[in-house]
Amino acid sequence: MTTAPTDTTLLAVRDLRTWFHTFSGTVKAVNGVSFDIGKGEVMGLVGESGGGKSVVGFSILGLIDSPGRIMGGQILLDGEDLAQASEDRLRQIRGREISMVFQDPMTSLNPLHTVGQQMDEVLRLHTDLDAADRRTACIEMLESVGISRAADRLGAYPHQFSGGMRQRVVIAIAMLARPRLIIADEPTTALDVTIQSQILKLMRRQIADKGASMILITHDLAVVSEMADHITVLYCGKVVERGRTRDLIETPAHPYTRGLIDSIPDPANRHARLKQIPGTVPDIRNLPKGCNFRDRCPRAQALCAEEEPELRPQNAAQWAACHYPLMPGDSA
Amino acid sequence: MLGYLLKRLFQMLLVLWVVSLVVFLMMSFTGDPVFMIVPIDATDSEIEQARRILGLDKSLPVQYWIFISSLLQGDFGQSYVFRQPAMALILERMPATIEMVVVAMVLAVVVAIPLGVYAGANPNGRLSRMIMAGSLLGISLPGFWVGMVLIYLFAVHWGIFPSSGRGDTAEVFGLRISLATWDGWHHIALPAITLSLGTMAILLRMTRAGMMEVARQDYMKFARAKGATRHDVLYKHGLKNALIPVVTIFGLQLGDLIAFATITETIFSWPGMGKLLIDSIYRADRPVIVVYLMLVALIFVVINFLVDIIYTLIDPRITLK
């Protein structure tokens, strides 16, 4: 698991633990998560709501607010540990090295500032360009995310844009300082289905053009299977499976991954009842002994209640944390 | 826009008319001004004569008609006591009140906004709790008591500030202004502080509440994710979004202080128009009271209008209709 980061690794997260100390107990939202992202790679971070996906994203940017805290682990960006970095250093990195696209474009843009002001802010913070050059850069960026008459639109306010257009603006802001890593937190969840694929295509093209890497946080395996080079599946703040996208989708080793895949609607078989994972995510403040997934798992046995499974290699490029992993050809 | 202005103008006239009616009616129930004017030993015929001269012998509707029709010709009536135009009396006193209120409001905003932003951004901090406790005092302590304590401490005990009066004034655009002289500033300090405390506390609490609400919004986190400084996130992204209720309260408080700074003016013998109102009520000087209250209504209407315009400057989604 803790292989050394190589030269092609952009971001290496090691044993990240982000906990929230609340009145009703400690929420270990992220509890020992590790993964690597190579330069130019797209990693899908997948799991149900409350699985800790967004907290991973915010931890990387150092945007965890009280009562949350990064309790341990490393976040290595080109070898520099962001978990130990000062607030000033993190501010240089935010928007410049790592930027973020949020879920809901209706709320992630400031309603009282023009689109131009919100774009300009990034360039003012992270570049030495003068006002005219910044304006040119903003117009070019807006055009490249598919907004026509970009020069006129700089003076418009977010409420004058549709949801899809706003998400394009958000993406434009995120890409503006040419960051090396984009963290996209459910970037299409709040959008119409028809807009979703446009936005995904746009993000893929932007990343490819600029040679950036991306963490795509989503609960939607269908989205991630189109976009990602490899996938990390989170459950109750822990990695339960990771591997190359194709391997993971075709031959998932963890029953939870299998359940997520099975709950994607199959267009060829529209009348079949949609499969779902029985039960709900356990209370994360009070996790049971053993495997966190065992109450919902069709393969659970006595050992699962006793001992928490470690993340183990299933084959050369696929890891799963399961005592009884699925083998290729097994049915769930 | 023109339609909007006309609509607001019409509303304003309607408000002023209703106020004139209400005030006029109320005045007619509150004692007979004739007895305040004639000498104690006046004969019945002298009293009758005074009544006729003042026009108080006529029926109420006729009195109101005379009042309204002369008002429309620009005549706001004469003070019974001073035998001078009521409006001129009030306007003469107005600069003193306005300058005290302006100093008080500026002081309130300059203190309340930064403290409110701080307390809203760090709701659990020790300093925030101290700020909030202080603001609770500011709201609950009555102005007359604060004024007297300030006089005792700063005027009587330490002798830093004078306890009463307006001090030297200088003519600016034909108005007598204290703020143009050092002595004037010296005199205005205590009454302005007294007047500002309540408003300061309310604005502080509004700002804090707004900031706490805004802090939860995604655009605040997005601004941080862009790499903006804490100061920029709070003031450029946060405060502007928290400002609408603060501006609303600011407008109401401004009108309130201009109209009813009476108590503070009385404590500090500040020769403003609030003190004129109190004196006129004691002397049953009806014309002054009526004109004063109509002027107050006008001030409120105008302030509200300005506040509405400020809304549109803050939030582009708000339009004047």
Image (cartoon, rainbow, N blue to C red):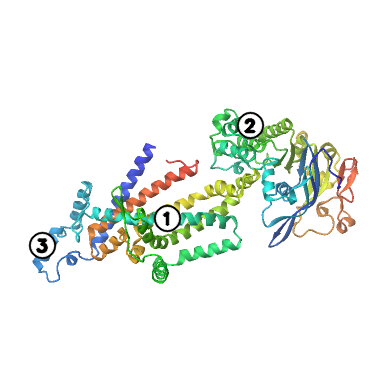
Tell me the element at label 3: helix
Depth order, front residue of B112/B72: B112
Disc 2 and disc 1 on one polypeptide chain:
no
Q: Say whether disc 3 or disc 1 marks the residue closer to the N-terminus.
A: 3
Tell me the element at label 1: helix
Q: Amino acid at mark 2?
A: Met
The answer to whether one can see residue A18 in this image is yes
Q: Amino acid at mark 1?
A: Met
Closer mark to the observer between disc 2 and disc 3 = 2
Count neighbours of disc 3 (C-alpha within 10 A) and say few if under 14, some if 14 to 19, many if 20 or more: some
Q: Is residue A146 left or right of residue A156?
A: right
Q: Is residue A210 above or below residue B86?
A: above
Q: Chain of mark 2?
A: A
Count neighbours of disc 1 (C-alpha within 10 A) and say few if under 14, some if 14 to 19, many if 20 or more: many
Depth order, front residue of B85/B146: B146
Quarter of the rendering containing residue B282? bottom left
Q: Is residue A62 above or below residue A148?
A: below
Kindly identify which residue carries mark 3: B49
Kindly identify which residue carries mark 2: A141
Kindly identify which residue carries mark 1: B105
Q: Is residue A161 left or right of residue B294?
A: right
C-alpha distance separating marks 2 and 1 = 45 Å
C-alpha distance separating marks 2 and 3 = 86 Å
Q: Is residue A233 left or right of residue A184?
A: right
Residue B80: x and y in percent read 19, 60
Q: Chain of mark 1?
A: B
Closer mark to the observer between disc 2 and disc 1 = 1
Closer mark to the observer between disc 3 and disc 1 = 1
